[in-house]
Image: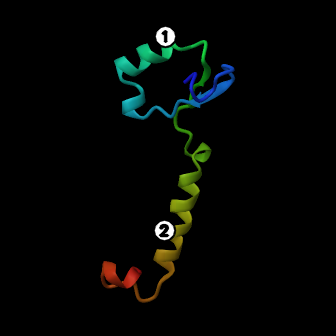
Amino acid sequence: MAFVFPTGNGIFQQDNAPCHKARIVLEWFEEHTDEFHLMPWPPNSPDLNPMEYIWDVMERQLRAQTPPCPNISTLA
């Protein structure tokens, strides 16, 4: 991460995605701890993920359609 944060002041927000929790990735984090700060992601915290709000808005709009869309092509 030194190429992105050369002063060592970067932050990586750990989101607990399976690929970010793989042993090789965790070992890499350990080797590069002086290059950035690793922030843990609290478990069961969808409120911290902005995409959850977007999915909620989209779901409400789709459910409010009367009649519902008969197929995918009418959604566009």
> 71 above or below 10?
below
Q: Are marks 2 and 1 in contact (CB under 8 Å)?
A: no
Image quarter (top left, top right, bottom left or bottom right) of the N terminus: top right
Residue 60, given in percent of the width and then of the height, sits at 53, 71
Q: Whole-Å distance between the Cαs marked 2 and 1?
A: 42 Å
Tag 2, which secondary structure? helix
In the picture of the structure, the residue carrying the numbered disc 2 is: 59
Give coordinates of residue 74: x percent, y percent: 37, 85
Identify the element where label 1 is drawn.
helix
Looking at the rendered image, the disc whose residue lies closer to the viewer, 2 or 1, is: 1
Which amino acid, mark 1?
Glu
State the image quarter where residue 69 is shown: bottom left
Which quadrant of the figure has residue 56? Answer: bottom right
The residue at 49%/17% (across/down) is: 29
Near-viewer residue (64 or 58): 58
Q: Please tell me the numbered disc located at residue 31.
A: 1
Q: Residue at x 60, y 46 (%)?
A: 47
Q: How is the image coloured?
A: rainbow
Q: Residues within 10 Å of mark 2 (few under 14, many from 20)?
A: few
In primary-sequence order, the first of circles 2 and 1 is 1
Residue at 52% x, 75% y is 61
- The image quarter in which residue 38 lies: top right
| Quarter of the C terminus within the rendering | bottom left
Question: In this view, which residue lies farthest toward the bottom?
Answer: 67
Quick one: 22 or 10, which is closer to the camera? Answer: 10
Residue at 35% from the left image edge and 18% from the top image edge: 24
Q: Nearer the viewer, residue 69 or 7?
A: 7
Horizontal placement of 26 versus 71: left or right? right
Label 2 sits on what residue type? Glu
